[in-house]
Amino acid sequence: MGWISASYGKVQFTATVKLNDANYVSALKTRADGSQYVTISFTIANFAGTTTKISIDFDVTTTAALIKDSGQVYLPYVDLSVTLKKLLGLA
């Protein structure tokens, strides 16, 4: 959900866009510096029918943290004890 301000005021909107929907999402683009991005574009309208086209660039990266991983604690790897290995039949 977001707010778009234009000459006719503010418009509140909610949109669900699937990344494989070519009607809204561009093909992967590359900038001169080698970074990659996609552009999501859509049109909003007020009750009078005045429209505004919105285009927003989103960076594409393979190093960003996933939302589901935010706040997760990654514990260090601990070797199994000899006793546990024997119980599991690994020793």
Image (tube, grey):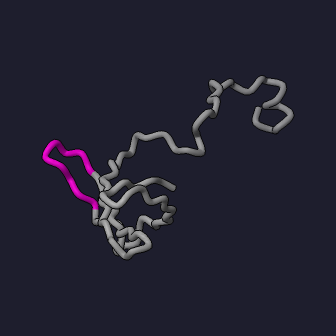
Front residue of this view, candidates 20 and 6: 6
Q: Is residue 23 magenta?
A: no
Front residue of this view, candidates 25 and 5: 5
Residue 8 position in % (x across, y down): 34, 61
Determine whether 9 is above or below 45 in the image. Answer: above
> Which residue is drawn at the image coordinates 65% and 26% (left, top)?
75
> Which residue is drawn at the image coordinates 62% and 29% (left, top)?
74
* Quarter of the figure with the C terminus: top right
Determine whether 52 is above or below 56 in the image. Answer: below
Read off the magenta span: 28-36
Q: Is residue 34 magenta?
A: yes
Residue 39 position in % (x across, y down): 30, 59
Residue 14 position in % (x across, y down): 51, 62
> Which residue is drawn at the image coordinates 19% and 45% (left, top)?
34
Front residue of this view, candidates 34 and 48: 48
From the viewer's perspective, is 37 left or right of 65? left
Front residue of this view, candidates 7 and 62: 7
Mainly helix, strand or loop, the magenta region?
A: loop
Total marks in image: 0
From the viewer's perspective, is 70 left or right of 28? right
**Residue extending farthest right:** 87
Determine whether 38 is above or below 64 in the image. Answer: below
From the viewer's perspective, is 89 left or right of 65? right
